[in-house]
Image (cartoon, rainbow, N blue to C red):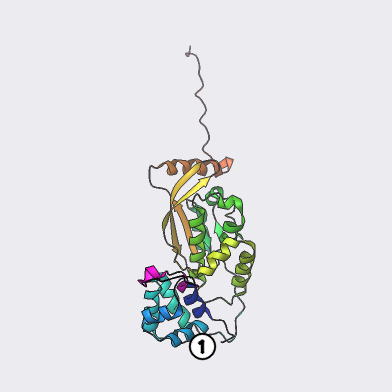
Amino acid sequence: MSERANPLGDYVRARRELVTPEQAGIPVHGVRRVPGLRREEVAMLAGISADYYLRLEQGRDRNPSVQVLESLARVLRLDEAATAYLLSLAAAEPRRRRRRPRKESVPPGVAKLVATLALPAYVEGRYLDVLAVNALATALSPRLVPGANRLRDTFLDPAERALYPDWESAGAGMVAGFRASVGTDTDDPRFIELVGELSLASPRFSRLWARHDVNACEGAAKEIDHPQLGVLRLNRERLGVGGGRTLVVYHPDPGSDAAEKLTLLAAATQPPQEREPSRPSPEVTGPRR
């Protein structure tokens, strides 16, 4: 077995263990000693030899055809995003020399846009580091500040977890989106440091990471349980701004309860000098003589 990193083999093995025989249409007789499908079952369903599949999983064959990979994606019940990720793993070429990573930053125009938006907004990098944020987003979550990491806060900060009524789903979605964002660039020191830290500190993250779920983060409805305002049902949009960076914006449905709550939160975040001054009562005077 090759001593080199084997992301393709690791991925198909992890996904194989998540597909039940019932899902694959295979009758079960007696007690099975392995979770999910056996190697020979995957090979049979994909139309390849068991020996060839074993070589793929062990990293002894790193150049499968697109047809083989698409057959494996079908057997492993991968969706469009996960299939694209599988294809990218096979296409990735080993790097001979890694360049020093460039520090992520936000273009000045994007930073100005975030600051002037009347909605909670922030920019995150490909490793989910917060690069720019406006005051309303920080009021929504005090952990949303430049330099914070969304993944670390979600799994290691109890106050951040408390914001999400469905934290199990939120955490799983964030891990799957993080894997999609990083792609095959898994030798980056920032990636190694972050995944290593979270794997040791959070059993929940470690279990989710071992699943190899992949999901491109897109727009979705989200619930946030704010300590002062209660539950806000917001729409979250994610817009690429180049260089692997993403602009994240939360907005409520017009006329909704969440819209009223965001208006209150926005008013509370304004500096005193920017708030609308109260109009003085007109001076009452007697009739002129």
Residue at figure coordinates x 44%, y 40% from the top left:
260
Position of 54 with respect to 149 (left or right) is left
Q: Residue 160 at x, y = what percent?
A: 57, 52
| Callout 1 crowding tier (Cα within 10 Å): few <14, some 14–19, many ≥20 | some
In the displayed structure, 56 sits above or below 210; it is below
Q: Is residue 112 magenta?
A: no
Q: Residue 239 at x, y = what percent?
A: 44, 62
Q: Residue 110 at x, y = what percent?
A: 50, 61
Q: Is residue 79 visible?
A: no
Specify the quadrant of the image occupied by residue 188: bottom right
Q: Amino acid at mark 1?
A: Arg
In the displayed structure, 165 sits above or below 17; it is above
Q: Which residues are magenta?
A: 15-37
Residue that numbered label 1 is attached to: 60
Q: Is residue 179 visible?
A: yes
Specify the quadrant of the image occupied by residue 99: bottom right
